[in-house]
Amino acid sequence: MRFIKHIIGAVLTTALIGVPLTLTQIVYADISDISVYVNGIKTEFDEPPASENDRTLVPMRGIFEALGAEVYWDEKSETASAFLNEDTMSITIDNNIMLKNNDEIILDVPARMYGDRTLVPVRAISEAFGSYVGWDENTQTGFVDSKENPMNETIISDEYRYPNYNGNFNDVDIFDKNNEDYFGMELLHISDEQGSAYAKTINAFANSAPNANVYNIVVPTAAEFYASDEYKTSYTPAIRKIYSQLNDNVKGINAVSPLMNHADENIYFHTDHHWTQLGAYYVYEAFINELGDDIDPYYTFDKQTISNYYGSLTRFTADTDGYDMLMSSPNALQLFSPKVSYEGYSFNDMEMNDFISNVEPIVPGFKNYNCFLGGDYPLQVYNTDVNNGRSLVIIKESYGNAFSTWALNNFETVYIVDYRKFNNYGGTNEYENVFKINEFYELTNFTDLLIISYPVSVTNAPEAAALRTMTE
């Protein structure tokens, strides 16, 4: 049986009820208090969860059927049974012994009948079919997944949050510590519908490159780690839902944990909506480790530092009080150069016939976020002396720029594609060249494909449509 990564159990009960239970006390949870997602899809219950002896009981049929199991009820013996693949389980009302493939599993509390529904302890879900169960305290959300989710056991601490909220200035939310050290952030929300549509698009990318290794990274904005308690974002559970809906031929990469582990470092700009190249390094390290490779420590790379950097958020807040706040809190722009030798080219078209110019991964002369890749080109190609036969395609918006600079160190060829520069993005007729991922796969036979996005790629209709069009 697969190892169960996390059990909700008493944690969920305490969060819902808030008071200890006596030995025989049974309490119904307010169904509005919690949400349960099975493989990333919200499950609706006609009978609310209940609690008994500090343990949570949940409706058996709704969850098991969402997992793909067949569920049966024998009224005479008051026994519920479920069948999934080659596994069978059964449990009798008021009995704490569950049978799995005729093996006995003793549960902390028995199954109960509430109304006309069978409720079983959470442990029964995990034990029955090896499901992975998780809980997000901030959003009061439970998760049940058929396969291990890379976001399991991801915890966001509050120690680095900026406690004071100064207001919203042209869609930029600004926080501070002690009326100084101002931090501009984007507070975005990924709905279930947006996340599901995005996951469907990522699956379509994978199906278009059947022999490639396909990866997906959704990167949170700075607000996930630094916004005050009252304005906490919920990217982590949203990303988990997305990854739960990815097919087996796509691997989701946890970007939240490595960023949380280094939240005391310069991983996001205070005056720009982007992350820094250092923040991107920590997520790239997690990505390349997943591929079975590694990268040298960031401090071993040649570094240049540009002081007093003022980023995109100062432009967004111009003519508002927020502008002066951000101008008082500049960042240092740190630039790390690849260790390998390379040649870089940029093109307007997928076929790489319409040449634009030679390009560099690091261009200090811009003195802004365009230092990474020299800005946003439709297609960049870097040929390196890595000589390992691996070629990586990165589908990205601007968040992918800082990330892509690190990839030159591990791949023989790196293709960097900005999906906003093709297929008539935004309907402006500015970018009319066509890019289809299946055709590019046939053209280049790349070995690895990564789609890296920050929340705007998931939530904004033009961006979501542009990504989807690449797979159609």
Image (cartoon, rainbow, N blue to C red):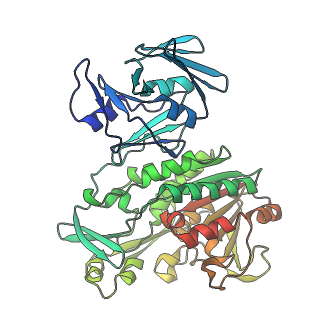
Where is residue 129, by image quadrant?
A: top right
Q: Nearer the viewer, residue 75 or 214?
A: 75
Tell which residue pokes out farthest to the bottom in this image.
319
Tell which residue pokes out farthest to the right in this image.
442
> Eyeballing the image, is 337 above or below 150?
below
Left or right of 220? Residue 351 is right
Tell which residue pokes out farthest to the left in this image.
178
Where is residue 46, by image quadrant?
A: top left
> Eyeballing the image, is 343 above or below 293?
below
Residue 256 position in % (x across, y down): 44, 52
Q: How many marks?
A: 0
Q: Nearer the viewer, residue 324 or 462?
A: 462
Q: Nearer the viewer, residue 287 or 230?
A: 230
Residue 111 position in % (x across, y down): 42, 20
Question: Which image quadrant: the N terminus?
Answer: top right
Left or right of 133? Residue 23 is left
Task: Identify the residue at image location x=20%, y=32%.
Answer: 19
Task: Identify the residue at image location x=57%, y=73%.
Answer: 462
Residue 357 position in % (x across, y down): 69, 83
Question: Which image quadrant: the C terminus?
Answer: bottom right
Left or right of 8? Residue 409 is right
> Eyeballing the image, is 225 above or below 152?
below
Left or right of 81? Residue 415 is right
Q: Do we see residue 347 in this rendering?
A: yes
Q: Nearer the viewer, residue 219 or 402?
A: 219
Task: Identify the residue at image location x=32%, y=60%.
Answer: 226
